[in-house]
């Protein structure tokens, strides 16, 4: 180094913050650049800069690790969290009429002079505009509310259009009559009015909602506000400094004022966002298939439609049973004819006829068991449907238009029970015919176990049982058929909780192998009544539930274990049983999985 020459400081490392420019790049820079400046002052060892992005650009930037942090809408965050391991470190506190709120919604609106559009149902057959089909506040919130009121925006509209960013275009299109109604994030109408772009009196809000501490125009339920999130490659130390700085941001700071916020708070629960996406089959839940019967029932189909579907299914099942009965009668007649011919011929054929007789008797016993089990199981929900339908009918006949919603809900629950029975029968039929298939997807084992434990908790509590999990895995994300694996775990865990009283039910998870040759073992262990040696040999057969006393104590067709083992074997695994009567049982669900790259998908706490 030459004496007298100034020493140049090394340039600071640059960290990029990708922000969703839902109202355009200029507004995004104006809103969030002061936040980057605030972080630069709080963390002198780093240089933060803001990169405005739309939804597709944001996904690409995260996938290619072109940014280090993101500020994006709630819906896209959940997708980035699932697919790329992005982790929230803070949640936005919006400024709502001077109050802090970590939630937001969407507004559905039309022109104030549209007398033909006053409710969400009136949108059917009209022209509608959102921001983007993948936009959380720009379409998906409104989509869910429309489904609740019997309007499917993908089928029931004259046209469905999307403006893209900036979302202000939706308000202009409604005002100018280019579309009949539209939706975007709540607070936007008020912001545009404050900016002089529109007059609020020109618009009418559909399905207006009132939420505590949220005084903006809104038509939907509220969801968690935008998160500030880190990518996997961003260091934990830097992320902790950024989180600390954000949580310490004063409400009157330049960054908070420019962002029109009241600072940041600790990360909130984003489970309501998962529930919305699961209901719409979008984002990480798009692979679950088309809308199911359960989804259709949730859309408030009137109870007459539910009863009609149940009666149609019952009629179809009755026809199948009658056809089976006629075939069995024909077989029995043929057997009697062969027995008579055998007496008149030779005794050498006796062994063959005995085999035929045993087969016919087995078929007859199977028929009797099938009719008894199915008749009992179908009769229970059908009696409930008919009984509560008669109650509702009597109320209507007497002029009482205020029907007890609990009676209608019991009709719905009974119909869903009936549908579940028929679905199990169809699954067993597919397995026996060899037409069943599996659908692989990538998912989190810890989330899967959490869902299974939550579903089993009420039954466990009812019997005084305690649930616990022992996880010995070194990874969390795998690829296999999540739906079938979860179904098998739920069946086995329900059985353990059902046949155990005042005990402990444990799920012990172990791993064998690695990579594409990994085998996961789920040990479901209880200290309940156990299973007798006689029942152990046939516990995985259809219509087998336990011994006679158990059958009388617990309802069910006994299809769960048979179906679960069938799908586990279809996946290349199995379900095995170890039990001792009076001491408890251990079911082991073994399935092969593909371990997803752990370092790429690991979500930091």
Image (tube, rainbow, N blue to C red):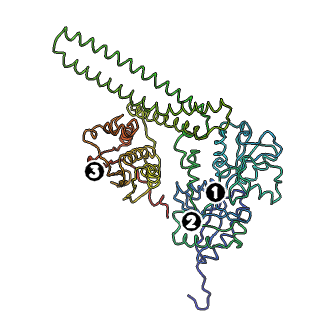
Q: Which residue is drawn at 58% across and 70% down?
A: 243
Q: Name the residue under label 1.
A: 73
Q: Mark 3 points at which residue?
A: 583
Badge 2 crowding class, 10 Å Cα cut-off, few under 14, some 14 to 19, many 20 or more, is many
Above or below, comparing residue 177 to residue 511 in the picture: above
Badge 3 crowding class, 10 Å Cα cut-off, few under 14, some 14 to 19, many 20 or more, is few
Badge 1 marks a residue whose secondary structure is loop
Q: Are marks 2 and 1 in contact (CB under 8 Å)?
A: no
Q: Name the residue under label 2.
A: 89
Q: Which of marks 1 and 3 is nearer the N terminus?
A: 1
Say which of 514 and 6 sits in front. Answer: 514
Q: Find residue 103 and report its horizontal and vertical position in percent.
A: 65, 59
Q: Which of marks 2 and 3 is nearer the N terminus?
A: 2
Above or below, comparing residue 304 to residue 35 in the picture: above
Residue 93 relative to residue 412: left or right:
right
Residue 13 relative to residue 589: left or right:
right
Q: Which residue is drawn at 35% across and 46% down?
A: 499
Q: Which of marks 2 and 1 is nearer the N terminus?
A: 1
Question: Visible in this render: residue 3?
Answer: yes
Distance Cα–Cα, label 2 vs label 3: 47 Å
């Amino acid at each position: 180094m030459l004496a007298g020459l100034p020493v140049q400081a090394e340039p600071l490392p640059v960290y990029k913050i990708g922000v969703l420019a839902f109202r355009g790049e200029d507004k995004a820079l104006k809103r969030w650049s002061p936040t980057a400046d605030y972080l630069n002052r709080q963390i002198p060892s780093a240089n933060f800069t803001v990169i405005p992005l739309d939804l597709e650009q944001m996904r690409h930037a995260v996938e290619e690790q072109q940014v280090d942090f993101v500020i994006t809408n709630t819906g896209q965050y959940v997708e980035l969290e699932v697919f790329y391991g992005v982790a929230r470190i803070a949640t936005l506190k919006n400024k709502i009429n001077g109050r802090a709120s970590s939630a937001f919604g969407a507004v559905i609106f039309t022109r104030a002079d549209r007398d033909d559009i006053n409710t969400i149902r009136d949108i059917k057959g009209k022209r509608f505009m959102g921001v983007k089909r993948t936009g959380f506040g720009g379409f998906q919130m409104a989509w869910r509310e429309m489904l609740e009121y019997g309007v499917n925006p993908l089928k029931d509209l004259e046209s469905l259009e999307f403006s893209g960013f900036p979302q202000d275009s939706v308000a202009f299109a409604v005002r100018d009559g280019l579309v009949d109604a539209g939706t975007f994030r709540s607070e936007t109408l008020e912001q545009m009015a404050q900016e002089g772009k529109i007059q609020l009196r020109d618009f009418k809000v559909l399905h207006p909602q009132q939420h505590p501490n949220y005084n903006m125009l809104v038509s939907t339920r509220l969801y968690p506000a935008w998160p500030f999130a880190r990518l996997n490659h961003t260091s934990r130390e830097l992320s902790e400094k950024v989180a600390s700085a954000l949580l310490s941001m004063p409400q009157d700071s330049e960054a908070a004022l420019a962002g029109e916020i009241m600072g940041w708070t600790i990360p909130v629960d984003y489970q309501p966002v998962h529930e919305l996406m699961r209901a719409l089959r979008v984002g990480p839940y798009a692979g679950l298939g088309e809308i199911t019967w359960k989804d259709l029932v949730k859309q408030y189909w009137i109870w007459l439609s539910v009863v009609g579907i149940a009666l149609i299914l019952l009629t179809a099942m009755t026809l199948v049973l009658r056809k089976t009965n006629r075939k069995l009668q024909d077989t029995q007649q043929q057997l009697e004819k062969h027995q008579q011919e055998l007496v008149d011929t030779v005794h050498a054929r006796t062994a063959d006829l005995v085999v035929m007789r045993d087969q016919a008797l087995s078929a007859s016993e199977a028929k009797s068991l099938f009719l008894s089990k199915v008749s009992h199981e179908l009769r229970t929900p059908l009696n409930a449907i008919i009984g509560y339908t008669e109650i509702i009918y009597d109320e209507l006949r007497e002029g009482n238009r205020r029907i007890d919603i609990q009676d209608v809900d019991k009709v719905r629950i009974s119909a869903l029970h009936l549908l579940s029975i028929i679905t199990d029968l169809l699954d067993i039929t597919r397995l026996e015919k060899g037409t069943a298939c599996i659908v692989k997807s990538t998912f989190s084992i810890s989330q899967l176990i959490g869902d299974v434990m939550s579903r089993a908790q009420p039954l466990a509590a009812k019997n005084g049982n305690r649930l616990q999990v022992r996880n010995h895995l070194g990874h969390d994300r795998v690829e296999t058929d999540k739906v079938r694996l979860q179904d098998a775990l739920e069946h086995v865990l329900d059985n353990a909780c059902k046949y155990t009283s005042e005990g402990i039910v444990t799920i012990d998870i172990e791993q064998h192998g690695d990579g594409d040759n990994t085998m996961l073992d789920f040990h479901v262990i209880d200290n309940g009544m156990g299973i007798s040696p006689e029942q152990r040999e046939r516990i995985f057969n259809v219509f087998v539930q336990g011994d006679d006393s158990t059958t009388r104590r617990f309802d069910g067709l006994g299809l769960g274990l048979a179906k679960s083992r069938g799908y586990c074997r279809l996946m290349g695994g199995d379900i095995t049983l170890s039990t001792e009567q009076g001491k408890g049982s251990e079911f082991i669900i073994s399935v092969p999985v593909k371990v997803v790259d752990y370092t790429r998908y690991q979500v930091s706490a």
